Amino acid sequence: MGMMYQRSPGMRPEIKEYGCYFMSLIEAAAKRRTDYLFTVEAINAIYDTCVFNGWMREDCYIIDPAAILKTCGIAAVYKGKFPHNRVCGDDEFEILHYTYRPKSWHHFVGGNGFGMVAYDPWGISLTATQGQLVSKRIFKVG
């Protein structure tokens, strides 16, 4: 994907402000789909499709993450929200949810399967570096 971030030039303002979970899903798809280039234009179009179909609100609140992945060409089942210490199986991947209490910030990042940050859609965020891992969203591929 050539590392796209939610604040990359040309991203929709809603993605820049609130798109961490959305961009973590995009990055997870980009890792698994090498035949498609996830450009800023493509990501903005995916945003439009997801909002139009009700899979995500305009403020990037995710309603149906599996449908978003399917839009990106990835067949995955959303297994749900799990405790922070759940380890992924070989056919699973995770999106990590961090909080930073002094500011009440929430942030989602791509994980490595063992609860460590593999992709931060902000680049390097205070929430993911100094916050607390509170939960995981787990997906089964295929």
Image (cartoon, rainbow, N blue to C red):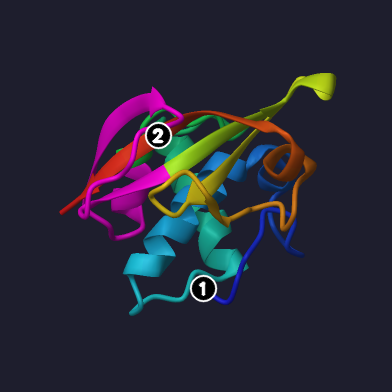
Which image quadrant: the C terminus? bottom left
Secondary element type, mark 1: loop
Q: Assess whether mark 1 and mark 2 are in contact (beta carbons under 8 angstroms).
A: no
On screen, residue 68 above or below 36: above
- Residue position marked by numbered label 1 in the rendering: 1
Depth check: give the residue in front, 22 or 44: 22
Amino acid at the residue labelled 1: Met
Q: CA distance from mark 2 to mark 1?
A: 22 Å
On screen, residue 133 above or below 74: above
Residue drawn at (27%, 57%) of the image: 74
Q: Which mark is residue 134?
A: none
On screen, residue 100 above or below 126: above
What x and y, as percent, mark residue 65?
Answer: 37, 38
Instruction: Give residue 101's quadrant in the image.
Output: top right
Residue 36 highlighted magenta (yes or no): no
Residue drawn at (47%, 50%) of the image: 111
Left or right: 73, with 49 as reference point: left
Query: Crowding at label 1, few (<14), some or many (≥20) Cα neighbours within 10 Å?
Result: some
Region in magenta: 67-94
Can residue 47 be seen here? The reply is no
Residue drawn at (83%, 23%) of the image: 103
What x and y, as percent, mark residue 81?
Answer: 37, 25
What x and y, as percent, mark residue 140?
Answer: 22, 45
- Which callout, 2 or 1, points to the residue nearer the camera? 2
State the residue lying farthest toward the right.
102
Amino acid at the residue labelled 2: Arg
Residue drawn at (29%, 42%) of the image: 139
Q: Earlier in the sequence, mark 2 or mark 1?
A: 1
Can residue 73 be seen here? The reply is yes
What x and y, as percent, mark residue 23?
Answer: 55, 51
- Residue position marked by numbered label 2 in the rendering: 137
Depth check: give the residue in front, 106 or 100: 100
